[in-house]
Amino acid sequence: MQLSTKDLQQSKNWLTSAEKEALIQVISCSFNGVAAKQYYIKYFAKTDVLERKLRLYFADQQLVGYCLITFSQHDSDVLIRASAAFYPQYRQGGNTFTFSMKQAILYWLKNPRKNIFYADTMLSPAMYRVMAKKLAIIWPSANGNYQANYLFEQFNHRGFISPALKVPCLVAAGRASNYSEQEVANFKASNKAEINFYCQINPEFDKGTALFVIIPVTLKQFVLSALKVIKTTFR
């Protein structure tokens, strides 16, 4: 289903009261074990980030999902974080990929000399697959032994090690995606390489453990990812 969108930037134009309440309802229905209003305050209202950008998704003028991008300073690095939620019938990884990557590219174009990383705590194997299929450099990854351990230690120091990968790439998210038992079983039985890899290194994603994913935002990333997409398209 084609959804309409509305883009917001916290420093310029932000949520109306009606949009805020609708957003809290989406959060409440999307995650288990979450106090939706507290979640909203933590991720949408605190002043601990440089900037927030938000895309709202609508079906027949009803708010059905969102993708939030935040920018924060970590010593000499800039960390771009993402958060997304949808009502179950509107979940599609492609909904948020384009917006997330566009914001990362625009920030890099304005700050090409900075060390910029995009990070996401992924509770969804499907979202990981969307990213891993389209991006050339993503950690952790099944495509190589190098997993940038020092970055996980820097950005995910409160996380813990995946026994299957021996990399500190897991984090207790304090929430779990509202998947049905059948959906969880389908993920764990999937023969899709990216989903299979995700489930091996994060088998308890349905219990509130998220995979912490790091993506370097560099010229090398853009070039290699474009080549990857072209190669996949014409394969």
Image: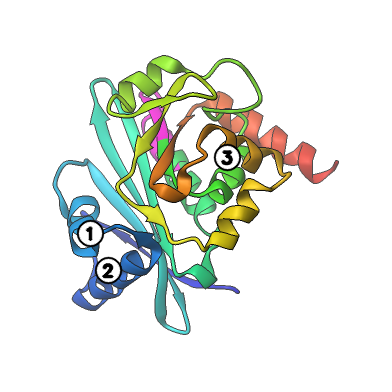
Disc 1 versus disc 3: distance between alpha carbons?
28 Å
Classed neighbour count for the residue bearing mark 2: other residues with Cα under 10 Å, few (<14), some (14–19), many (≥20) = some
**What residue do we see at 19% from left, 64% from top?**
37
In this picture, residue 231 sits left or right of residue 201:
right
Q: Which residues are magenta?
A: 106-118
Which residue is disc 1 drawn over? 40
**What residue do we see at 35% from left, 60% from top?**
32
In primary-sequence order, the first of circles 1 and 2 is 2
Give the structural element (helix, strand or loop) at label 3: helix
Give the structural element (helix, strand or loop) at label 1: helix
Residue mark closest to the camera, 1 vs 3: 3
Disc 3 versus disc 2: distance between alpha carbons?
29 Å
- Tell me, for residue 199, which label it has, or none: 3
Q: Name the amino acid, label 1.
A: Tyr
Residue 110 x/y as whole percent: 37, 35
Classed neighbour count for the residue bearing mark 3: other residues with Cα under 10 Å, few (<14), some (14–19), many (≥20) = some
Which residue is disc 2 drawn over? 24
Residue 234 x/y as whole percent: 84, 43
Q: Is residue 220 magenta?
A: no
Classed neighbour count for the residue bearing mark 1: other residues with Cα under 10 Å, few (<14), some (14–19), many (≥20) = some
Looking at the rendered image, the quarter that the C terminus falls into is top right
- Tell me, for residue 200, which label it has, or none: none
Marks 3 and 2 in Cβ contact (< 8 Å): no
Is any atom of residue 34 visible in this view?
yes
Viewer-nearest residue: 51 or 129: 129
